[in-house]
Amino acid sequence: MGTSLFPLPKRVVAPGAVHVPGWLDLERQRELVEACRTWARGPVPMRSAALPSGHRMSVRTVCLGWHWYPYAYSRTADDVDGARVAPFPSWLGELGRAALADAWEQDATDYRPDAALINFYDERARMGMHQDRDERAREPVVSLSIGDTCTFRFGNPDSRARPHTDVELESGDLFVFGGPSRLAHHGVPAVRPGTADPACGLASGRINITLRVTGLESGERT
């Protein structure tokens, strides 16, 4: 799958971290964009999450399955309107299993993501270096990019400092990280506006869909 005339090959960035350029074709990208527009309307609307410091993130987020807020998960959006988060659709789990199987070239039948974070980046949005460690489980994170190209900085599990690798994620790209890289620090220092093919369904900005296994039982919260 892919949109480039000469798609780049799969690349292992670090043990357990794999970049698959052009994994989503344009039709699937458009389908996901339309789904994201529906999810962004609620029952919990897309919002800029507030950090404990009071600072609001420049990225806007809507969640499925479990609601994430810094730095916890719950079934209800207690930091927004108290509504119960939209359910995680089974077809998105199937997409996640296919993505993991292709990236790692192994059977992914047992991969059962139960939460998705859909992040929208405009041209000013950034994401600082951080770890995805609010999940109780340590199953791989599956990340899908649609829209404008971004610089994705993938670091190490020990600190926000070097060494890190900058990866250009284009519309349709897949990035999976798990195993020894599951707790690697990562971030998005830059988005390049106007770089997406309008046929992807997104006129401007970047959508990032990340699938996670929380390891939580219904009714729990972290």
Image (spheres, grey):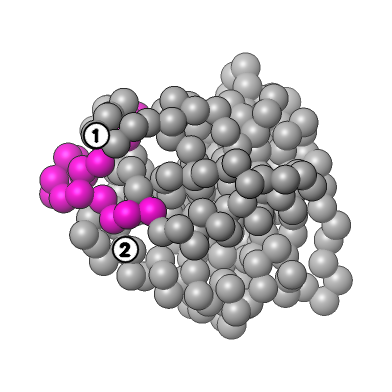
Which mark is on residue 219? 1
First of labels 2, 1 by sequence position: 2
- Work out which quarter of the rendered image holds the C terminus and state it: top left
Q: Is residue 17 above or below residue 143?
A: above
Q: Is residue 5 at least partly visible in the picture?
A: yes
Q: Which residues are magenta?
A: 69-88
- State which quarter of the image contains the N terminus: bottom right
Q: Residue at x 51, y 49 (%)?
A: 210
Left or right of 124? Residue 39 is left
Q: CA distance from mark 2 to mark 1?
A: 23 Å
Q: Quick one: 218 or 131, which is closer to the camera?
A: 218
What's the residue type where badge 1 is placed? Gly
Q: Are marks 2 and 1 in contact (CB under 8 Å)?
A: no
Between 126 and 11, the one nearer to me in the picture = 11
Q: Position of residue 72 (x, y in %)?
A: 32, 30
Q: Amino acid at mark 2?
A: Ala
Q: Residue at the spot x=43%, y=49% of the render?
A: 116
Tell me if residue 78 is in the magenta stretch: yes
Left or right, 86 with respect to 28, comes to: left
Residue pointed to by mark 2: 40
Residue 99 relative to residue 7: left or right: left
Q: Position of residue 167 (x, y in %)?
A: 71, 47
Residue at 41%, 59% (x, y): give it.
89
